[in-house]
Image (tube, rainbow, N blue to C red):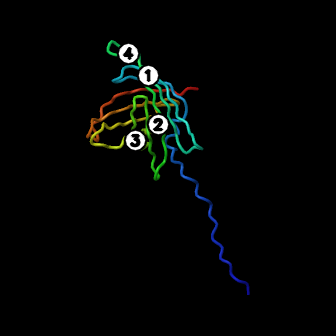
Amino acid sequence: MFPMLLVPALQAPTPAPKPFTPLEFLVGSWEGEGGGDPGKGTGSFTFGFELANTVLVRRNRADYPATNERPAFSHEDLTVVFSEGGKLRAEYFDNEGHVIRYGITGPDDKGSIQFLSDFSASSPRFRLTYTPTGKDRLSLRFDIAPPGSADGFKTYIEATAKRKK
């Protein structure tokens, strides 16, 4: 009689989750134009994977011409998107000293991705929405709600962008 060997059933390994899949349409270099409270501006931004594809980094620059009320200025920011506890999160930093912590949701029925800042009763709340509008095109909107308001958003900037070839 032969001894019976117990062999565990072989299963194909489960593929690693792809947390960045909803954001893949953003990867690349973009040129845009837009307007809002800061005025009509021009700008560009990039989204690219870094650190062995464990983070998605957005680098942005917007230039605003001088007006009668203020001199010309440039805005630069850096956003690092990462997966934490199975959810997409982001940390935003800019040359004005702002730091914003976002949760990311989407896509919705329009394919939009939304970055929504964490709620604080003492700080404004921010919402940044990217919506694909065609091949290599998207719209973006940045809204701000006053301190203590979870949903009282008003649009601050609206823009469109086209992917650079």
Under circle 2, the secondary element is: strand
Q: Residue flagged by tag 1: what amino acid is it?
A: Ser
Q: How dense is the environment of label 2, judged by Cα within 10 Å: few (below 14), some, or many (20 and up)?
A: many
**Cα distance in 3D space between marks 1 and 4:** 10 Å
Q: Residue flagged by tag 4: what amino acid is it?
A: Pro
Q: How dense is the environment of label 3, judged by Cα within 10 Å: few (below 14), some, or many (20 and up)?
A: some
Q: Of the residues under marks 1 and 2, which one precedes in the sequence?
A: 1
Q: Is residue 103 above or below residue 4?
A: above
| Residue position marked by numbered label 2 in the rendering | 79
Q: Of the residues under marks 3 and 4, which one precedes in the sequence?
A: 4
Q: Residue flagged by tag 3: what amino acid is it?
A: Arg
Q: Residue flagged by tag 2: what amino acid is it?
A: Thr
| Residue position marked by numbered label 4 in the rendering | 71
In which image quadrant can residue 97 be found?
top left
Q: Position of residue 137 (x, y in %)?
A: 49, 29
Q: How dense is the environment of label 4, judged by Cα within 10 Å: few (below 14), some, or many (20 and up)?
A: few
Q: Where is residue 41 in the image (x, y as percent from the top left)?
A: 42, 20
Q: Of the residues under marks 3 and 1, which one precedes in the sequence?
A: 1
Asked whether 82 or 110 is in front, the reply is: 82
**Cα distance in 3D space between marks 3 and 4:** 30 Å
Q: In this view, does 16 lie above or below 146?
A: below
Give me the disc on residue 150.
none
Q: In which quarter of the image is the C terminus?
A: top right
**Cα distance in 3D space between marks 3 and 2:** 10 Å
**Cα distance in 3D space between marks 1 and 2:** 17 Å
The extreme front residue here reads: 97
Is 97 on the left-hand or right-hand side of 14? Answer: left
